[in-house]
Image (tube, rainbow, N blue to C red):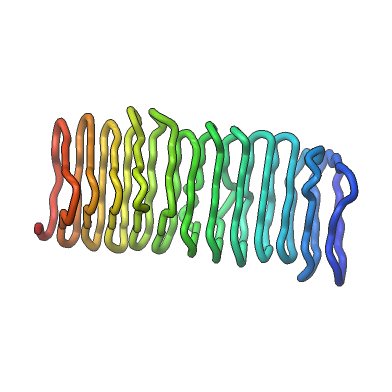
Amino acid sequence: GGLSVAVRTGDIAQSGAWRVGGNADFDAGAGAITLSNAGNDFGGAVHLSGGAAVVRDANALQLGTLDVAGLTATSGGALSLGSGSVAGNLVATSQGGGITQAGALSVAGTSSIDAGAGNITLTNAGNDFAGPVGLSGGAIALRDRNDLTLSHLRSAPGGDVHVVAGGALALPAQAIDAGSGSLHLAAHGGTLTSRGTLAGSDVSLHGAGGVVLAGDVLADGRLHLESGGDLVQSGGRVAAALLTGRAAGEA
């Protein structure tokens, strides 16, 4: 059935694998929560409140409400990051399962999200990733209500990539290549700034405050460029079968 564990002071840890059929609620106050046994199996949602939290599941893992200083979550299947806040860094690894969320996530530190061959779908409009975000997966979709910085993004060949920032969007120096998939990158409240190669079947780039291209932009099909400010190419080359777009200014 369900499990509820709370401590007033100190940490929550384990000496062996736990199997919980229902929901699990762990409240360590300011203490750490360390549930890292490889044999753990949580059948329901896992709610976490405390300091640095580490949770592992041999199978699919569904996180519930989060209020922790840091979070490392590892699953052997699908991984839901639940909703809530992480005051520090987030590390999420699903070993091939899809990574999703149940509600808005707020992460004050860096985020490293690795789904292996699985898809990453973190599109809640209330998300706020304050630090750089690294993404590895099949098809990737991410949304942030404020400024967003990507430290890296690696998708499977043919996996669609869709990243939207409510503010500015800063892209990594490493290439973002969707292969035969589509690539859509948008900064709805600031400048879209690229430093490395951007490639895909159809490529769409939008910057409400401007678009700055410092690397190659390669589209096997249609390339759409849209800028509410200047459209500046400071490096690289642009190649596409079809080019469309509009800009307030060009340089």
Counting the numbered discs, the total is 0
Comparing 149 with 125, the one in front is 149
| Res. 51 image quadrant | bottom right
Q: Is residue 241 left or right of residue 64?
A: left
Horizontally, residue 133 falls left or right of residue 17, namely: left
Residue drawn at 47 percent across, 48 percent down:
123
* Horizontal arrangement in the rendering, residue 42 relative to residue 83 (left or right): right
Q: Residue at x 63, y 41 (%)?
A: 79
State the image coordinates of residue 130 (x, y, percent, origin top left): 48, 64
Residue 85 percent location from the top left of the image: 61, 62
Q: Quadrant of the N terminus?
A: top right
Q: Position of residue 47 (x, y in %)?
A: 74, 54
Q: Residue at x 54, y 55 (%)?
A: 111
- Can you say whether 191 is above or below 62 in the image? below
- Identified at 35% across, 62% down, the residue is 167
Q: Quadrant of the C terminus?
A: bottom left
Asked which quadrant contains residue 19, the reply is top right
Residue 12: image x %, image y %?
84, 59
Reply above or below: 90 against 39.
below
Residue, far right? 15
